[in-house]
Amino acid sequence: MNITLHGWNLTFDYAAMLICILLLIWYFDKKRIPIDVSAFFVKFIISIFLCALSEVMAVELARMNVIGELGFNLLMSLYSFLASIISVVYASFLMVYLRVEKKHQRRIRFFLDTVLVLTFIIDILTPFTQIGFYFYGDSYEVGAFGGFYALLSLSTIVTSIGVVLKKRAEISNAKAVMLIVSVLFGSSMFVVQLAFTISLLTFGFALVALTLYNYIFNPAIYLDNLTNLYNKDCMRECLNIRFDNHNEFSILFIAMDDFKYINKTFGVDNGDNLLIQVGNYIRQVDGAELVFEYGSDQFAVICQETDEDKIYAMAETIQARFKHPWYTDSTVGAMMSASICCFKCPEDASNYGNLIEIMDYSMAMVKKTNKGGISKASELEVDKLRSEKEIEKAVKLAIDREELMVYYQPIFSIEKNKYNSAEALVRINDEQLGWISPEIFIPLAEKNGLIISMGNLIFKMVCQFIRDNNLAETDIEYIEVNISPVQLQQPDYYKKIIEIMEKYDVKPSQINIEITETANMVGASDVVNNNIEKLVEYGLTFSLDDYGSGYSNLDYINHMPFHIIKIDKFIVWDAFENIKAGITLEYTIKMLNALQYMIVAEGVETEEQKDQLANIGCHYMQGWYYSKAVSDKEFMQLINKAS
């Protein structure tokens, strides 16, 4: 490889220096980004600038005969070492930006430090031993260890790409591509420089820095255009850093009350002016380390102070200001109130997602119960919310992995004196939470919409069970499947049910759909009624589950196409403890028989209960006297043994 000194082109080095200067001016001209990774960006730019400067100085001073061969070699060794520093700083930036686990960071840093030390040793010895490169006549030649430069550079490239790929699932496609392309682009400049003797390395890295600024470090990305406060994206970055480092801190969440009324009364422009005033005031309050605009009329304040009394006093100071008018540009005094929630981390929340959930929940509670007041997370049952969120995640995980379990509780026919059907019951056993009660996760699934995918998966599993075990050849005539009213509210839901049944070759007579009485679907929507009508036309039967536990009105059973009525277990148990309850149950069963419904008594646990319920007209029995809900394999063993 020959590089002539007289033809050495420094144009790209000068361009790189100019880009670095502009980036530093742009970056420091606006509000600083309060995140640790920004320090690496500044180091990255300075390293590029110094690297380009060292090459410019070496060549220009040599051309002017200001320095001799040794001085030139020393400056070029500095250039070589600074090029390695650029690569290491970029790899370090990636680790912090992508929040690589601390233990992995230590390993990678040790490797990168080793690379730097080896490069430094070669560079420091080169001017005296010519092991890296040497000056020969009017050109440069690669020394005995010159190949190590390429090898060490390649190691940092592979490390950087490996870090991005390891955290690929946690970043967007656009950012992943941008980061990987940046690494490859900078590397390609190094290859081009070696192959064509053009000094492109610093220019290539400068373009990488320009790309990072545009996509990641531009202060405008993290600032709200109106208030010039840090925005929600910046808050997420700052809080993630604190959670990752296990820092203790407090945060105040401040929400303006009825701010829409302010905008309507004084106009949007005056409303914007008031938001700017509020933001500026909060920023000046003692103890407010960082202030963010969390929403259009909401602010969040991070405080290093963790003493609960001092944080509460800070909230009182902010709220006291709202007892006085705020003046608009038109000098109109506007009275506003604000609701404030106080949080301590990691005590109240251990990660960003958890904190946001608790903040949103807490503020909604405060708006209902203590509007315009100050509340602490500890006073707002956040433990209940946290528990619900953990269960919600467990349910979603079980659905995504298809790890739901369907258990079957057999139903005994009094007339046939054998098991003739069974109820399908969903079970979840989470690795962290253990067994979760259906009484807890079913209502949660209905509330957050997971019941749709859960119900479809359960129905599919039941149909597959019927087919795989050839239930048509056993005494089990049908399986009862619980359907949530939320599912029936989906347009054309009946098509999904029929599609699954036909896929597994299950006959309509082999499925009975249960709807709980507490759902009260009298006067249901046209969508619900259409789904039910279509399923009945297809040949499915419906049963009313938990009769007596909900609305208990005759319109309900008279207007819905129920074939079976299932008496709630608590009604059954109460009938054997209370004379009036017993009389009520007896006449209820007589009425249902007169209406020609088939009757299932739930919660049968003793022989006495079984005999008495049979005597007063119950057709089927379900309960622990016969069997608890069991797995599919245990169920098949049970019915095969019974037959």
Image (cartoon, rainbow, N blue to C red):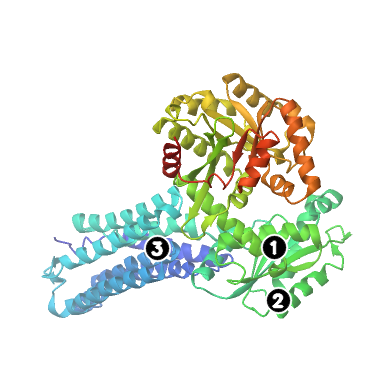
- Under tag 2, what secondary structure? helix
- Look at mark 1 in the image and give the residue it sits on: 299
Q: Name the residue type under label 3.
A: Leu
Give residue 94's mark: 3
Give the class, few, some or many, for how many residues have Cα within 10 Å of label 1's Cα (few <14, many ≥20). many
Dot placed on the residue nearer the N-terminal end, 3 or 1: 3
252 vs 419, left or right, is right
Q: Name the residue type under label 1.
A: Phe
Mark 2 vs mark 3, CA separation in Å: 35 Å
Mark 3 vs mark 1, CA separation in Å: 30 Å
The residue positioned 71% from the left and 27% from the top of the image is 560
- Look at mark 2 in the image and give the residue it sits on: 311
Relative to 356, say whether 559 is above or below: above
Q: Position of residue 277 (x, y in %)?
A: 76, 64
* Of residues 212 and 474, the one drawn nearer to the viewer in this rendering: 474
Which quadrant is the C terminus positioned in?
top left
Dot placed on the residue nearer the N-terminal end, 2 or 3: 3
